[in-house]
Image: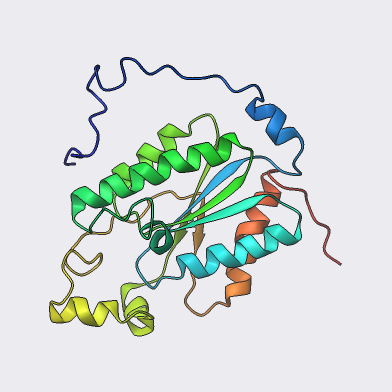
């Protein structure tokens, strides 16, 4: 994996004069006033697989259960925080590293943070998992076949990638390394958005991360 030009984590002088400031309110104190445990739900999958759609449907269900949540969407983040990044392999690495750090802050605040990013490289997803080794990191693989994603093509990106208008497009001329052992595998083909979202919420309830809801 290429090293990022944006930050050198091995440079001892990079943050030599920076000291971590301990907050007066701890993570446990922040989490104690919520009705759930903090966690990262990391939605990964091809473009058009349904990551953002399912993540937002899960967000709606969790909100109805009075959970404190926030969705970090790949496109939305590139309008601001990651607006300086392109789509080369190197920029994709930095894109995910930044989101991993932001997600860690959300977890420290006691939230359930849902991230919807292609995040094509296993090494980058593993990096985020290591960053949050003291928290719950839940990899949610939106497992939708490439041919189904191309049929959906909601933004017309696959057509542009096939014609050569877009370079470094995941699944076409840039690799996607599918998760081997995700905590949750959601197969969207032939399933409703609601059932896909409920699958994720059921997992959170089974793991004791949110209150178990007794269905009538």
Left or right of residue 22: residue 151: left
Against 212, is 145 above or below?
below
Q: Nearer the viewer, residue 185 or 6?
A: 6
Question: What colouring method underlies this structural image?
Answer: rainbow
Percent of width and height locating residue 80: 38, 55
Q: Quadrant of the N terminus?
A: top left
Against 109, is 72 above or below?
below
Q: Residue at x 41, y 56 (%)?
A: 77
Q: Nearer the viewer, residue 212 or 19?
A: 19
Q: Quadrant of the C terminus?
A: bottom right
Residue 150 lies in what quarter of the image?
bottom left
Percent of width and height locating residue 188: 49, 72
Left or right of residue 49: residue 135: right
Residue 59 lies in what quarter of the image?
bottom right
Q: Residue at x 42, y 65 (%)?
A: 143
Percent of width and height locating residue 169: 22, 67
Percent of width and height locating residue 113: 56, 49
Q: Residue at x 37, y 52 (%)?
A: 179
């Amino acid at each position: 994996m290429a090293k990022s030009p944006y930050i050198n984590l091995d440079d001892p002088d990079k943050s030599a004069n920076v000291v971590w400031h301990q907050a007066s309110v701890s993570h446990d104190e922040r989490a104690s006033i919520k009705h759930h445990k903090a966690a990262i739900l990391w939605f990964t999958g091809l473009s058009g697989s349904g990551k953002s759609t399912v993540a937002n449907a899960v967000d709606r269900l969790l909100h109805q259960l009075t959970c404190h949540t926030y969705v970090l969407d790949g496109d939305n983040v590139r309008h601001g925080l990651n607006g300086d990044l392109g789509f080369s392999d190197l920029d994709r690495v930095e894109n995910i590293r930044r989101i991993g750090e932001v997600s860690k802050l959300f977890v420290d605040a006691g939230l359930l943070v849902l991230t919807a990013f292609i995040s094509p490289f296993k090494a980058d997803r593993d990096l985020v998992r290591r960053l949050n080794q003291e928290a719950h990191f839940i990899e949610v693989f939106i497992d939708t076949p490439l041919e189904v994603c191309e049929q959906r093509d909601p933004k017309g990106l696959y057509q542009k990638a096939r014609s050569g208008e877009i370079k470094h497009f995941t699944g076409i001329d840039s690799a996607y390394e599918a998760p081997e052992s995700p905590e949750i595998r959601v197969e969207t083909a032939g399933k409703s958005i609601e059932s896909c979202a409920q699958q994720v919420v059921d997992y959170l309830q089974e793991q004791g991360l949110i209150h178990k809801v007794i269905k009538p």
